Image (cartoon, rainbow, N blue to C red):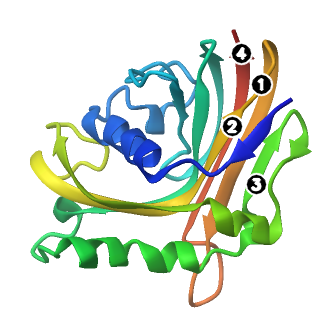
Amino acid sequence: MAAVEPPTAEEVRTSWLRLLSEPRQGNPAVDNTGAKCQVGQTSAGLWFLQSTIGGSVNRACTIPPGREIICNVLSCELSHPELPGEMLKDFDLEARTRPAIESVDKGTLNFIVDNHSLISGEEWEAYKVITPSSEVDFPADNLFRVQRGLTRFAAYGFYVKLTGLKRGPHTLYFGGAVPNPDGGPAIFETAVNYNLTQL
């Protein structure tokens, strides 16, 4: 039976290093079909499923046996190249990722496996994970199209570890929204519908 729990900070950090180290072309975060689902999946015992960097998509993905699935539901990542000229200390860089996520209405968050919602309401509070400021090497054509090279990044968001999927087909839907502090439409929304095949 499928079960959920919060992933560790190190598992989430590993998921970010995977995304940020890959060029934008072929990066799983901008994949509209699931064709890039296997890119960078080198962590023993883990498999990473990514949200979008805005908007909704349908993806298909095959999960190898013996993997715990780490899902990035809704998050805020920042790095020095994304904040040019500020050169924040590690603590301040981490702090800058928090306001957007703390403003999220948990009612907008979804994590649905085979048409069953597994997390709701205030249960989401336990799924917030901070990624402490860490070193990463941005490639030339990186995900956020900023300066290449070694830099520091931090992240904060809602993440879920999914375990116990039985062999065969499954559906997984997750996503959420960051509200506009001035009212009106959300300033950021993401949603992914995965058609999974668990080997």
- Is there any visible trace of residue 130 in the rendered image? yes
Q: Which residue in the structure is indicated by mark 2?
A: 162
- If you read the primary sequence from the N terminus, does the residue marked by circle 4 or circle 3 appear first? 3
Q: Which mark is residue 73?
A: none
- Residue under the point 75% across and 35% down: 172
Q: Amino acid at mark 4?
A: Gln
How far across and how far down the image is residue 35, in percent?
A: 52, 18
Mark 4–mark 1 CB contact (< 8 Å): yes
Name the residue type under label 1: Leu
Local crowd size for mark 4, using a 10 Å CA cut-off: few (<14), some (14–19), many (≥20): some
At x 59%, y 22%, the residue is 67
Asked if the residues shown at circle 1 and circle 3 are in contact, with their CB atoms under 8 angstroms apart, the answer is: no
The reply to whether the C-beta atoms of the residues labelled 2 and 1 are less than 8 Å apart is: yes
Label 1, label 3: how far apart the Cα atoms are = 18 Å
| Helix, strand or loop under label 4 | strand
**Marker disc for residue 165:** 1
* Labelled disc at residue 110: 3
Rendered view: 147 above or below 196: below
- On screen, residue 102 above or below 191: below
In the displayed structure, 44 sits above or below 83; it is above
Q: Tell me how far mark 2 sits from mark 4, CA to CA.
A: 12 Å
Find the distance from the CA under tag 3 to the CA under tag 2.
14 Å
Amino acid bearing label 2: Leu
Counting residues from the N terminus, which is met first, the one under dot 3 or under dot 2? 3
Q: Residue at x 71, y 21 (%)?
A: 196
Report how far apart the C-alphas of labels 4 and 3 lie in the structure. 21 Å
Give the residue at mark 4.
198
